[in-house]
Amino acid sequence: MADVNDETNGRAVVMQPDDGKSYWQPKPANGHADPKLLPVDTGFEGLSMGYQTIAPGCHIREHSHDEQIELQICHRGKGHVLVDGARHELVPGTSCFLGYNVKHEIFNDGDDELVMMWVIAPGGLEEFFATIGKERAAGDPAPEPFDRPADVITIERQMGMQDTK
């Protein structure tokens, strides 16, 4: 049972679709990340949750998390995910559990945006999106595709991620 003095006891956070920060993401994803339920807001360091939108024909490059587990749920669109090299189709409702050090790469194979909901434990993925992205306001037109920071590998390692390529 949780400690009654726990920061999350009696606490609830409800986020609407346009609430919170949003960040344009660099190539090759060319979409945006929308962190929603963050430790700073919930008082719970154990996880964070949000959405990542991947532009048509784009992808999230192969990586793994050595200090976090991740749940990925296809919310909208279609594509595929490579998990340790095995291909799995993504359609709305497809759910993925990605344990420590599991290589994964997500591809948008459709003509529309692919939207993935992510839950990561412990939290912190939101910091990565903010660090490599550009702040976005709801309804803003997409910027021209832009490159990742030159030191993205260092940034990933500082945040418990591993670029596997």
Image (cartoon, rainbow, N blue to C red):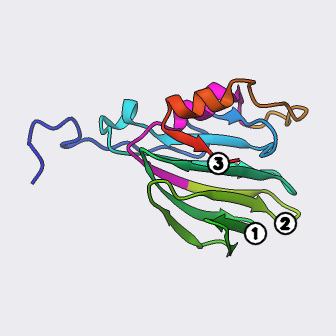
Expressed as whole percent of the image width and height from the top left, the position of residue 78 reads: 75, 69
Residue named by callout 3? 164
Residue named by callout 2? 110
In this view, the mark in front (1 or 3): 3
Q: State the residue at coordinates (54%, 53%).
A: 118
Q: Residues within 10 Å of mark 1 (few under 14, many from 20)?
A: many
Where, by quadrant of the figure, is residue 116 drawn?
bottom right
The residue stretch that appears in magenta = 118-138
Q: Report the amino acid beneath label 2.
A: Gly
Q: State the residue at coordinates (44%, 54%).
A: 100
Q: Report the amino acid beneath label 3.
A: Thr
In the rendered structure, which disc, 1 or 2, sits on the residue that comes first in sequence? 1
Instruction: Look at the picture and state if 68 lies above or below 155.
Output: below
As for residue 134 lying within the magenta part, the answer is: yes
Q: Residues within 10 Å of mark 2 (few under 14, many from 20)?
A: some
Expressed as whole percent of the image width and height from the top left, the position of residue 134 reads: 72, 26
Q: Looking at the image, do the residues carrying marks 1 and 2 touch, with CB atoms under 8 Å apart?
A: yes
In this view, the mark in front (3 or 2): 3
Where, by quadrant of the figure, is residue 91 drawn?
bottom right
